[in-house]
Amino acid sequence: MIRTIADLELLRESVDVEAKAAQGRDGQGEVPGAFWESYSALANTEGGYIVLGVREQGDGSLEVLGLANPEKVRTELWNGLNNPQKVSANLLSEADVYPLEEGGKTVLVVRVPRADRRQRPVYVGANPLGGTYRRNYTGDYRCNEAEVRRMIADAQEEAADAAILEGFSLDDLDPDSLAAYRNEFRTVRPDHPWAAQSTPDFLRSLEAYKRDRHGGKEGLTVAGLLMFGRDSAIRERFPHYFPDYREKTSPGPDPRWDDRLVPDGTWSGNLYDFYRRAYRKLVADLKVPFRFEGGRRVDETPVHEALREALVNTLVHADYRASGSILVEKLTDRFVFRNPGTLRVPLAQVYEGGHSDPRNPTLLRMFRLIGAGEQAGSGVPKILSAWREQHWRTPKLVEAFRPDTVTLELSTLSLLPEGAIEGLQEMFGARFAALEANERLALATAYVERQVNNARLQQITDLHPTDITRLLSKLVREGFLVPVGERKGRYYQLAEPAKGNRGSNSPHFPGSFPHFTGSYPHSEDDLSSSDPLLWGLLLNLARPVRQKGRAPKEEVRRVILELCSVTELSRQQLAELLGRSAKTLENSYLSQMVSKGLLMMRYPHNPNHPNQAYRTREGA
């Protein structure tokens, strides 16, 4: 709970906080019209605070104005919350609205919780298509129609993958995939009564094929098509469907992927085949010791199980209606899993476990029947446990918007890798050794992950968010870190080493792969020839801007973020994709988006580097 304005200042890097002057025309105070947009935005994102009677200055500092009549404002607030013509849902309890005294002045603090997915979208006025807002690091923004419709779809009780498809039949399924699944099912459950069923009955048991008892409609379900369908049929229903496995584990500067798995016509392209092939590649050469149970060697370790769980989670929580692809990466020092869509439960509950709300429960059931996928709500805790057992860095889960994605990064580096310690000692000398343990951990995180922020340190330390803000501010004052972005969008990178201390532009230690998480290593190449499948996907994402002579700036920014979330791209590549000049993009978009913390540069200390490339910042 915020008890002082100092608390408010310290929380702004970990929680969304919006200040409103709320003075009113008569000087007695009022709920400003912009309050409702912020209320909608916070409810549809991660929640946060709105403080009435405080003004944000041009430099970002807060000025306490106070409210002359706080009870008048409080009454007006509750009247608006309970008026469905004003806002669609009242999420607040009495405890969420309270006065705060500061220097003889009274302000009103409003805590807005994250709305349950069944309550979303929370919108202003009577029309969700025009009155739904979300929040990013630059402030509130109005959601487009596609975003609103996905929220409405997620609010429904009927599972996304249970719908019966019109115009599709069993002929759209790949018989080899289905046969392979049945064989695996028999191996895992040899005595199960379904094992002896005919193929049509088996599909009905799986709910891959279904009949609606009320309307009599019968046919293939979304889950059946995704799990066993042919790639062409899947893409006919889901145009953005593109499961993508990438592997780069070999040492050396060669930018090419060591291995790649995408639907290219040589295999079915469905989720079951992608799962089988990708899992084998993920665990091949996994350097984790086997274990013994009852004197018997068990080759499948908790790390194997965690990787399988991460892969299945990615497939069953994906929103296949959204733009963006399924991405699975195996890199030298980490695994990355990304799916389109948003979290259906708050991030804290995901880490806590016991709270499961899969977007595609029929798919989850299909995987569980062959021994893949955990009981409801236990998957992420199982992954965390396996990683703790190896003393690896705490897994990082990030929810981002525009495009909507959820990314899980599993680092195989220790919290304080020897290479990072050596590199930081080389950069900062005895000053680094003199720091406290959590300060060294913060710098090691910035070194290993190229950035650190309040949210990440909450995941890997026991510190309170306000104490983390103090710690990071201290490291900035002492010249170890430099801040990028504002408020909750702020993150920190290592300060430029003293001249002559290091020869490279950015820190790097042996064994790591010098690219951003999820990056594509061909950012200087002609992607249209080196990877036509990826280039085709990018062209499709960029089409809304490329086909317009003049596109709204917000739309251009949105598409840039979407493109750079798929892969790291140079100015020239972005220019070609968007049909704009590289100079226009640099001057009107890229530099501003970097300064606001929306984009990251490959060479942050050398903006004009000839091989400069851009990557959407996680959570932007």
Image (cartoon, rainbow, N blue to C red):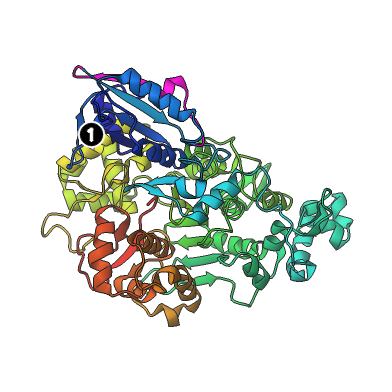
Image x and y of residue 206, in percent:
78, 53
In the displayed structure, would residue 335 be above or below residue 258?
above
Q: Identity of the amino acid at label 1?
A: Arg
> Are there few (<14), some (14-19), or many (20+) residues within 10 Å of tag 1?
many
Q: Is residue 414 left or right of residue 377?
A: left
- Residue 203 part of the magenta-drawn span: no
Foreground pick, 152 / 425: 152
Image x and y of residue 182, in percent:
79, 60
Question: Residue at left 38%, top 49%?
Answer: 141
Foreground pick, 556 / 433: 556
- Quarter holding residue 587: bottom left
Image x and y of residue 119, in percent:
55, 38
Question: Residue at left 60%, top 49%?
Answer: 153
Q: If the image is split into quadrants, where does the N terminus sit? A: top left
Q: Which residue is mark 1?
A: 55
Question: Residue at left 73%, top 67%?
Answer: 177
The residues colored magenta run: 88-104
* Callout 1: SS: strand
Residue 289 in view in this figure:
no
